[in-house]
Image (cartoon, helix red, strand yellow):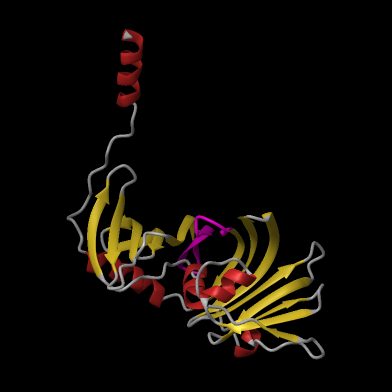
Amino acid sequence: MRRLVLLAVVAGGCSAPRVERPYPPPTADALLGAVRHRAAGVRSVRAEARIDHRGLAGRIGAVILLAARRPGHLRLDALSPFGSPVASLATDGRTVGFFDRDAGSFVRGPARACSLARLVRLPMDPDEAVEVLLGGVPLLDGDAEVSWDGRDAREVVRIRHASGASQKVRLAGKAGAWTARESEIRAADGRLRWRVEHEDWRSVGGVAMPEHTRVTDGRRADVRIRYREQDVNVDLPDKIFATGAPPGVPVEDAPCE
């Protein structure tokens, strides 16, 4: 018994010490303002990445070329081991088109979360997906409160939307220069809609960008992105986000609820 007590005391004494805020407590407006300020300075990204999806069907991995531009413009091209595209998804913020070259099929649907969830297993709508690929997090509107996590030295903002949905955002940085490192949104019933984690930050053209990003809904979707190359604030023409089918390929309309 004495040994068990001693081990418990030792284990408790080895826990990481809590860190105090090194600056005066910020307001929720200041923290969320920093998130929005960073977002305003990143309008587009072009990248090559390794993407791994883990879900009910097992694990699927591919190298992708991606392009994203505000508002809601997104293109993803999955490459074969020989570097040629085998599947492409594009959205112009209104319509989503998905072309499977091996199957010779083209699926078209509305630019909504249900389409991206069905086609590429991202549990968010195009605007939200673009925000994440630009290294940010989408934000709910609503009442917000701030707390400090002394174990990880993170600011935590909790937002309550009028619908009952809620969001938790975890930020790191110094006074006036915070970045969102993790966020999750839950429906009014508490169900997780999605969680985003950004890790291993680096400077790309003077802009802080994550090298690794994970998006999950805690159930069917768990998407992990490891960026190999990133270019930010590049000019991306409208034509690369075109959602039409290639000539001769039949179109399947896939409305979703």
Q: Residue furthest top?
A: 2
Would residue 226 appear left or right of 72 to someone viewing this image?
Answer: right
Residue 223 vertical placement versus 2 (above, below)? below
Q: Which residues are magenta?
A: 203-223
Would residue 178 appear left or right of 125 to someone viewing this image?
Answer: left
Residue 230 % position (x, y) = 58, 67
Snapshot quadrant of residue 229: bottom right
Residue at image position (23%, 49%) is 22
Q: Residue furthest left?
A: 24
Q: Is residue 205 magenta?
A: yes
Residue 54 % position (x, y) = 62, 54
Snapshot quadrant of residue 251: bottom right
Residue at image position (64%, 89%) is 239
- Quadrant (top left, top right, bottom left, bottom right) of the N terminus: top left
Residue at image position (70%, 75%) is 88
**Along the line of sight, the residue nearer the viewer: 247 or 67:** 247
Snapshot quadrant of residue 66: bottom right
Residue at image position (68%, 56%) is 57
**Along the line of sight, the residue nearer the viewer: 172 or 255:** 255
Would residue 180 appear left or right of 229 to someone viewing this image?
Answer: left
**Along the line of sight, the residue nearer the viewer: 120 or 214:** 120
Q: Is residue 168 magenta?
A: no
Q: Main secondary structure of the magenta part?
A: strand
Residue 164 % position (x, y) = 30, 68
Residue 69 % position (x, y) = 53, 80
